[in-house]
Amino acid sequence: MRLLERMRKEWFMIGIVLAIAGAKLEPSIGVNGGPLKPEITVSYIAVATIFFNSGLSLKTEELTGALVHIRLHLFIQIFTLAFFPATIWLFLQLLSITPINEWLLKGLQTVGCMPPPVSSAVILTKAVGGNEAAAIFNSAFGSFLGIIVTPLLLLLFLGSSSSVPFTSIFSQLFMTVVVPLVIGQIVRRYIKDWLERTKPPFGAVSSSVLLMIIYTTFCGTFSNPNIDLDRLSLVVILFIRIPMLKIVFAGHEHLSLISVPLLIYHPVQILLGSVLVPTIKSWMVSRQKGVKLTRPTV
């Protein structure tokens, strides 16, 4: 009984292990063009489901209230699209004196210039009990901002320039993020009483979608023939931790090496974030209890 209770409690962690193991055993199922068609089911349907789920679960006042946290939004965007890329650049200056392949280092700089993945940022914030509304706003806004800022950062740090298809990227983000969120809010207005009475498992739905993303992401990683590196380079990349990449470096002879950090980053980011969920969640709960205890009684 205790084992079953433990497994029920840790179902998400067990799901991560099974998803990665399944991807390793048969990666062809979850790759682009495979039976699961992740280029459609993940890139569009899964992401849209996450934001529809968020729109359905969040109160409208929570979403509108998140908009007024200007200092929070400024901090997140400056940290993500200015401080972090600059820090990575400084760190790579030190790594440049090591035997690590220089094109892998350029790939790491490219990772540092990218906005964080939209779907996993929202799901992980929701899983730990964080400010989901703020996560939604900053993920969406950061992605739209990244359409302009990321190519400029790559030009600054790597000297790589290109013409980015702003319209197609913008329309995809709008249709998979903004539209499902708004539809979820509209639907919530008509079934608000039912939602409050039944309390559907929104967190479990988002976590299940994340497991699908983890599975297809690792399928793509395990099936990619370009991950063929010397041990030192691979270990460093793993421990440091896209279409836009292919646009900026289209036709580049070292594209496969530049791509490696991005191929590794997404699954590692999702995996580490998922593993840290219980720890961060318990920390947040203890902090919230501490705040309640220190509040003066009237």
Image (tube, helix red, strand yellow):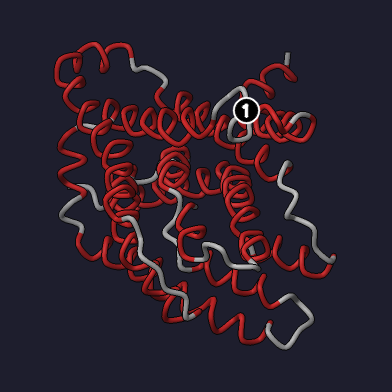
Going 50% across and 79% down the picture, which residue do you hit?
Answer: 158
- Using residue 286 as the reference point, say whether residue 189 is left or right of it: left
Q: Is residue 134 visible?
A: no
Structural crowding at the residue carrying mark 1, measured as other residues with C-alpha within 10 Å and reported as few (<14), some (14–19) or many (≥20): few
Residue at coordinates 55% horizontally, 35% vertically from top-left?
213
Left or right: where 199 falls relative to 46: left
* Residue at left offset 72%, top offset 88%: 97
Instruction: Say above or below: 284 vs 16.
Output: below
Residue 230 is left or right of residue 259, and the answer is: right
Q: Could you tell me which quadrant the N terminus lies in?
A: top right
Asked which quadrant contains residue 49, the reply is top left
The structure residue drawn at horizontal position 51% and vertical position 58%, both measured from the top left corner, is 246
Give the camera-side residue of 271 and 23. 23
Query: Does 44 sit above or below residue 4?
Result: below
For label 1, the residue is 34
Say which amino acid is labelled 1. Answer: Gly
Along the line of sight, the residue nearer the viewer: 82 or 54: 82
**Residue 200 position within the rendered picture, expressed as x and y whole percent measured from the top left:** 37, 17
Query: Residue 101: which quarter of the image?
Result: bottom right
In terms of depth relative to the viewer, which is nearer, 276 or 56? Answer: 56
